[in-house]
Amino acid sequence: MSTQRRPPRRVCLFVPTKKTKAALALVAASLAALSACTSQTPATAPNPATSTTPPPVASVTISDNNATALNPRTPVVVTAANGKLTKVTVTNTAKGNAVGGTLSADGTRWTSNEPLGYGATYSVVADATGTDGKPVEQNGTLHTLTPAAQAYPAMTPAPPGAGATFGVGQIIGVSFDHAVTDRAAVEKALKVTTNPPQQGSWHWIDNKTVHYRPPTYWQAGTTITLAADLYGVDLGGGVYGQTDRSVTYRIHDSWIAKADGNTEQMQILHNGTQVGSMPISIGKDSTPTHVGPHVISDKQQQVVMDSCTYGLCPPAPGAYRSTEYWAERISNDGEFVHENPNTVGEQGSSNVSHGCINLSPENAQAFFGQFGLGDVVEVTNSGGPQLPIYDTYGDWELSWSQWQAGSALH
């Protein structure tokens, strides 16, 4: 039996030629490049910690810089961004005095804390340090307005001395030495605070005078504070308030005298309770005493009564000039409560005076010792006209609604 052998396997060996070697090298390079593109942690990634962006430079702003008619009450404000203020100087260029101010806790805002002057020029120099550590300076100029006139506010009554008090009928107010055309602006600048709190309203007596009162007399023991913040306030027509003023008044117990022309008696009331009565003689038919509430505005132990003060001069019939004692003024046209020994016989029975309320020497001294500024004398049944509102303190003649109607803000 014959045996056949398989032919031996042929083993092929790859022997690269020059061309194949070059092709293989190109493939290897491509694979290396692909591997580099898909790498998750490139060796050349940027490091944020090495950023070189510089810190911002400080910026300083001056409010109303280059203003030409700045209201002197408007505060100067200087602010800094990207830094802090280190020094702010605001100087009146004519007088050389500096304006005070306060810096905020974070050093970014400076605000003046006192008013500027009228018609003045101010230079502003603001220094700051930026977050970059570098200093910055900002300069500015401000010009305040020049009023056509400045109105001075006189207080009514005048600021009292220590310990002085007033009666429950006391009227308070402000009088100006220039006419006011913007009454609402004035009333907004006037603030009345009372303790205990009480309602009140302003009423314009004329274009220079404004008064304030409650609906009825003040409560006994009231403290009244009037603040007139008028500096920088345009009163109209280019007239500005000259200054700010403030005053406090204290009201004592209620003392009211009720003078009746029919009974010729005057009742004395203390805190609403009658504590006495005095015979009186008030104005005769030809010279009647004004009717209505009167408020004592002055008191003198001795005063000269002269009819010429209200236009009745010698040799006109009824003209007079005499010295009277224990006199308290209750109106500006010559009405007083005073001693008159010559009419004691008529006191309590008939009215014979020129308009005053006559008392005996004893009663006049007692009245003088108890009644004072702001206390009230109410006159009824006198046959006379109502006391004019403009006659010192005729304010109580008006009803509350009439009084309120005299306010520019009502």
Image: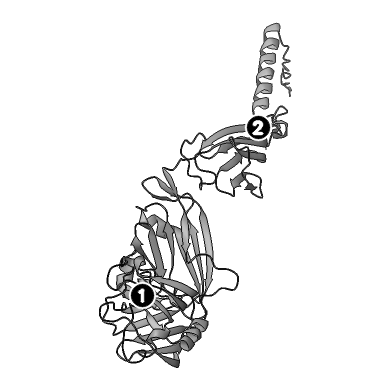
Q: Quadrant of residue 274?
A: bottom left
Q: Residues within 10 Å of mark 2 (few under 14, many from 20)?
A: some
Residue 403 visible? yes
Give above or below for 40 relative to 189: above
- Mark 2 secondary-structure assignment: strand
Residue at point 40%, 66% (across, down): 211
- Mark 1 secondary-structure assignment: helix
Please state if 288 lies on the left or on the right of 186 as rendered.
left
Disc marking residue 396: 1
Give above or below for 357 relative to 388: below
Give above or below for 152 relative to 129: below
**Cβ–Cβ under 8 Å for marks 1 and 2:** no
Q: Quadrant of the N terminus?
A: top right
Color style of the picture: one colour
Residue that numbered label 2 is attached to: 136
Q: Nearer the viewer, residue 332 or 274?
A: 332
Residue 409 visible? no
List x then y, in percent, for residue 241: 46, 51
Q: Amino acid at mark 1?
A: Trp
Disc marking residue 205: none
Q: Quadrant of the C terminus?
A: bottom left
List x then y, in percent, for residue 43: 73, 28
